[in-house]
Image (tube, rainbow, N blue to C red):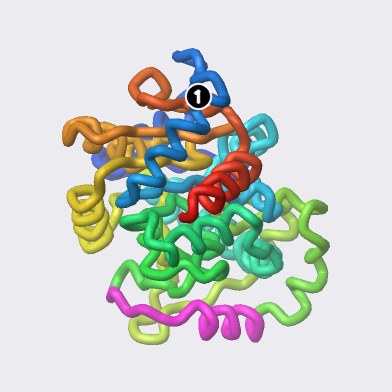
Amino acid sequence: MPSRHDPQPQFEDARLSAAHRAALRSLDRVVEHTAEPTEPSLAREAVLEQLLAGNVLLLTGAGISTDSGIPDYRGPQGSLRRSRPMTFQEFQADPEARQRYWARGFVGTRLMGQARPNISHHIVADWQRRGLLSGIVTQNVDGLHAAAGATDVVALHGDMRSVICLDCGNAEPRASFERRLEEANPGYRESVTVRVGELDVNADGDVSLDADTVARFHTVRCLVCGSDRLKPSVVYFGENVPAPTRERAEELKAASTSLLVVGSSLAVMSGYRFVLDAQKRGQHVSVINGGPGRADARVETLWRTQAAPALEELDAALRRAGR
C-alpha cells in the first residue's frame, strides 16, 4: 500500500489521469458527524424488530473485522491515517507501483492469514443458518465471513483467492502464485515477517514496507503471456465492481425487506448505493457503526457502537424471543 510519500504517477492517457483523480477524491472523502445517533436502547429495539421480521440484507464493512486484528480504513486507528491504498490506475500503469504492491502483499497476506473470525462473524453466520438474513454482502476481502461458516457471501470488492493477468485475462490460483513468488524470493518473507500488530497491516491485505525492502523484491510474470501486469482478484479504488457481483447484489436487494449495515462508514459509492436503493424501495435501513458515516442523516436507525457488543446483545435478545 503506497504511502502519501510514494512517487505520484504521471499518466499519458488523460482518461487514466481523470479516473485516478476521481479515485483519490473517494479516498480523501472526509466522513463527518451529520446526524444524532438513535438512543441506544431504542436503536437496539429497532434492529431487533427488523431481525425478528426476517428477510434482512446484511452489508458489512471493515468495522466487523477489527476485533480480528485487521484495521478499518477511516476509524481513529484506521489505515488511511498512515497510508492510502493503491488506485487501479497506478497499478495498471506503473511497474514500480506493481512491485511495491506485490512486495507488501507477499508479506501482508501471510500476516492477514493469521487473522481468525471473531464473535461478530460467528453470530452473522449463525443468523444466516437460522434464516434471519436474506443475504450477506461484504465490502471486506478478508474471507472471514466464510471462515466463520457463512455461505454464498457476496464479496463486493472481491477476495484474495486468485490473481488475474490484465493483458490476457488468465486466472491463476493465489496459492500457486504465492509459491512462484516464494521461489523467486527465497527468505524474503522471513526477513521481514513479524507478528500481526508489529507491522502496519492494512485492510486489503498488505503491509507498509520501506523502500529498500521493496527494492529487493522480485515479481513474477503471467504463465500464459509473460506480462508482469498481474493483479489480485480484488476491486481497487478507481475500479468498477465486476458485473456478475453487481447483478447478484441487485438480486439480493430486490428480494430483501430491509437493510442492516454493520461496521461501514459507507464512504465509497459501492456501499452507499445500498442505502439509496433500499430507500427507493421504501425499506427500513439501520446502521451499526462505531464512527460517523456517509448515510447517517438518511437512515431510520443509527446505532453508534462497535459491532461485537451490539451483535452480542441482539443475538441474546433473539434467543430469548425463540429465534
Residue 321 drawn above or below residue 153: above
* Residue 283, visible in the rendered structure: yes
- Residue 321 lies, in percent from the top left, at 49, 48
Numbered marks: total: 1
Above or below for 31 versus 169: above
Q: What residue type is labelled 1?
A: Leu
The front one of 13 and 85 is: 85
Q: In this view, does 16 lie above or below 103?
A: above
In the image, residue 175 lies in the stretch drawn in magenta: yes
Percent x, y for residue 215? 68, 61
Identity of the residue drawn at 40% across and 38% down? 49
Q: In this view, does 28 lie to the left or right of 281?
A: right
**Who is closer to the viewer here, 39 or 156?**
39
Relative vertical location of residue 50 with respect to residue 128 in this rendering, above or below: above
Q: Is residue 177 left or right of residue 271?
A: right
Query: Relative to residue 35, is residue 211 drawn left or right?
Result: right
Bounds of the magenta span? Answer: 168-184
Q: What element carries label 1?
A: helix
In this view of the protein, which residue sits in the foreground, 11 or 116?
116
Point 49% across, 20% down: residue: 38
Q: Position of residue 136 (x, y in %)?
A: 39, 56
Q: Position of residue 85 (x, y in %)?
A: 52, 45
- Residue ID at (68%, 63%): 115
Between 203 and 254, the one lying in front of the other is 254
Q: Image quarter for residue 112?
A: bottom right
Q: Is residue 24 magenta?
A: no
Image point (30%, 41%), residue name: 258
Give the dominant element type of the magenta stretch: helix, strand or loop: helix
Residue that badge 1 annotates: 42
